Amino acid sequence: MSEVAPKAVAQVPICVDLDGTLVRTDTLVESALLLLKKNPLSLFSMLAWLLGGKANLKQKLAERVLPDPKLLPYHKGLLQWLRDRKAEGRRLVLVTAANNRIAESVADHLGIFDEVIASCENRNMSAHNKAGELASRYGVRGYDYVGNSNDDLPVWTSCRESVIVSATEEVAKAARGRAPVAAEFPPETSPLRALLTAMRPHQWSKNLLVFVSIVIGQSFTDGPLLASTIMAFVSFCLVSSSVYLVNDMLDLSSDRRHSEKRRRPFASGSAPLIFGVVGAPALLIFGLLLAGTVSAAFTGVLTMYLLLTLSYSFYLKRHVLLDVLVLAMLYTLRIIAGAAVGESLPSVWLMSFSMFVFTSLAMAKRYAELKALASEEGGWIGGRGYHVHDLSVVAQLGASSGYISVLVLALYVDSAEVGETYDEYFFMYLLCPLLMYWIGRIWVLASRGMLTQDPVIFATRDRVSYLIFALGGVLLWAAL
């Protein structure tokens, strides 16, 4: 195709890609996740739709779900640049491989585009298809193009000027060799670093509960058992991180409505969703393979943890009270998993204590979230089922559960089991006031609006908690 005669700059349209460019996400993956959240079995339908071609898959998804254009993570710098060009009289065209229903909803929301060119049921508007369509409409060198990926290289080859957005250095270099660069927006963060953040390594401290059994059983000198427990800890971290990735990908809409959670890597777009789609099963498989080297019993408990966590992510977390009980069960399963490493079970005392204390902490987390919403109109926790009117009930249930755990601890210390294990067990009675103080402090901070994160994670960063845990360790040592 021959080149068209040069046009006045004002007459040259600026054609803008959507996925990964105008928005820091992939609307196809988001649509698939939305449908999976509604019905996990729809995965099989999506595989069947894909057999009819990628355009067919996009069409079928768009007929059933649409990402909310108001919540999408737009590239603010690019969006302002486009608005400035619009003010100068430039014509803006949204041209995308996304389905036309998604493209139209985004264009209607932003109100800056003069035209929309997108995929339909029979045609995927990507790469060479997009390049051919734009050259046919505007002529070679008759348009400017804004893109971000390898798929955009054929389009940059025939455009007048390029705008490079959040591209890798390899793609950016290739784009610079195809057309003069009008503007460039480099990546603001490292996608791999953002993925690591999404794996929530700070949450791995919860998995230290697998060591509880060897601490209580005084099995520190058992080298093979200690090594197996360390392997179990690593396995738990990998599996739990895979679930965190799944949870964050399913919670995109609710996270983006939250003042803090909207900064999470997938919600903000700093980590590509495809990284999560690939990373979650990879972490899961590696974690389960590692678990298989520990023991069959541990692998069984870890599998129970995985199934319960996925049930929580897809369904259970939307149900009042049931969600906190499930969270407490997940903490308790970590303790059971640690005992399973040595082919045993923790005592009923320990499991009872764990359920009560972690129910209290889960309630404190929900209370803190409700407290933050107390001044907002409506006051619902998105996707959780709680309302600010539930504050007093949540506080009563949570605080009472916490103090019941103190009672369980006191009864345990008075049991024959402790007398057989600890020579100076009377020192352990002093653990009760320490626990009473710590739980009471957690709830006082929550009532003052000072508990802004998961109480377990809060404890790993709180000096007072460190002091209390250190004193508890000294008392256990003195009781030996």
Image: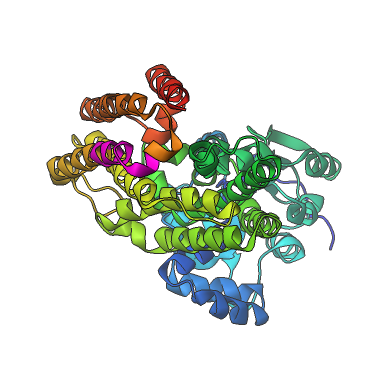
Compared with 94, 51 (above or below) is: below
Left or right: where does residue 441 sit relative to residue 260? left
Observer-nearest of 300 and 221 = 221
Instruction: State the extent of the magenta-drawn residues as a range.
Output: 406-418
465, above or below 319, in the image: above
Which residue is located at x 31 percent, y 54 percent?
A: 325
For the N terminus, the image quarter is bottom right
- Taking the magenta stretch, the answer to whether it contains residue 104 is no
Q: Position of residue 466 (x, y in %)?
A: 44, 21
Image location (x, y in percent) of residue 478: 44, 21
Describe residue 251's horizontal placement relative to residue 5 as left or right: left
Q: Which residue is drawn at 71% across and 57% down?
A: 293
Q: In the image, is 41 to the left or to the right of 357?
A: right
Depth order, front residue of 439/110: 439
- In the image, 239 versus 255, the foreground residue is 239
Please indicate, yes or no, whether residue 79 appears anywhere in the rendered image.
no
Secondary structure mostly seen in magenta is helix
Q: Nearer the viewer, residue 102 or 196?
A: 196
Q: Where is residue 63 in the image (x, y as percent from the top left)?
A: 46, 74
103 to 434, vertically: above or below: below
